[in-house]
């Protein structure tokens, strides 16, 4: 089944940007609430991905993570909890 695509442009404070297209049908499947916009869904996915990556770097990487990396994880997980109303561990079932 062919799907239409929704295209997103991501812009950073430094003036850089990127563009990506995602199948619209997938966005509809991921919508958790009526009225959740495609941009909100992609924002959620971006933050979840960042939280997973920093969590992996701190807890599953080679050797002990330094204090700077741990601070980045803490800040990321604080933003995660603010956005989703639950901790990374609660959402994923993976807590340390």
Image (spheres, rainbow, N blue to C red):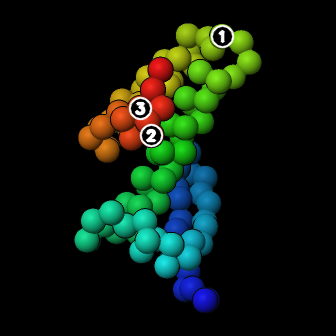
Between 12 and 53, the residue placed more toward the observer is: 53
Q: Which mark is residue 89?
A: 3
Mark 3–mark 1 CB contact (< 8 Å): no
* Left or right: 31 as drawn, with respect to 20: left
| Distance between the alpha carbons at the discs numbered 2 and 1 | 23 Å
Q: Is residue 55 above or below residue 71?
A: below
- Residue matched to label 2: 92
Q: Does residue 6 appear in this view?
A: no
* Left or right: 80 as drawn, with respect to 53: left
Percent from the top left, x then y, of residue 24? 50, 78
Residue at horizontal 26 percent and vertical 41 percent from the top: 85
Q: Is residue 77 above or below residue 48?
A: above
How would you rate the neighbour count of disc 3 (Cα within 10 Å): few for under 14, some for 14-19, many for 20 or more? Answer: few
Mark 2–mark 1 CB contact (< 8 Å): no
- Residue matched to label 1: 64
Between 65 and 15, the residue placed more toward the observer is: 65
Q: Nearer the N terminus, badge 2 or badge 1?
A: 1
Q: Does residue 93 appear in this view?
A: yes
Residue lying at the far right of the rendered structure: 62
How would you rate the neighbour count of disc 2 (Cα within 10 Å): few for under 14, some for 14-19, many for 20 or more? Answer: few
> Residue 7's quadrant in the figure?
bottom right
Q: Secondary structure at mark 1?
A: loop
Mark 3–mark 2 CB contact (< 8 Å): yes
Percent from the top left, x then y, of residue 74? 44, 23
Q: Secondary structure at mark 3?
A: helix
Residue at horizontal 52 percent and vertical 56 percent from the top: 11
């Amino acid at each position: 089944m062919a799907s239409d695509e929704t295209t997103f442009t991501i812009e950073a404070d430094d003036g850089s940007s990127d563009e990506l297209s995602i199948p619209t049908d997938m966005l509809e499947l991921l919508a958790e609430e009526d009225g959740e916009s495609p941009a909100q869904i992609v924002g959620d996915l971006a933050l979840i991905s960042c939280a997973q990556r920093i969590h992996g770097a701190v807890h599953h990487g080679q050797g002990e993570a330094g204090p700077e990396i741990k601070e980045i994880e803490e800040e990321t997980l604080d933003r995660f909890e603010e956005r989703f109303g639950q901790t990374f561990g609660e959402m994923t079932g993976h807590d340390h």
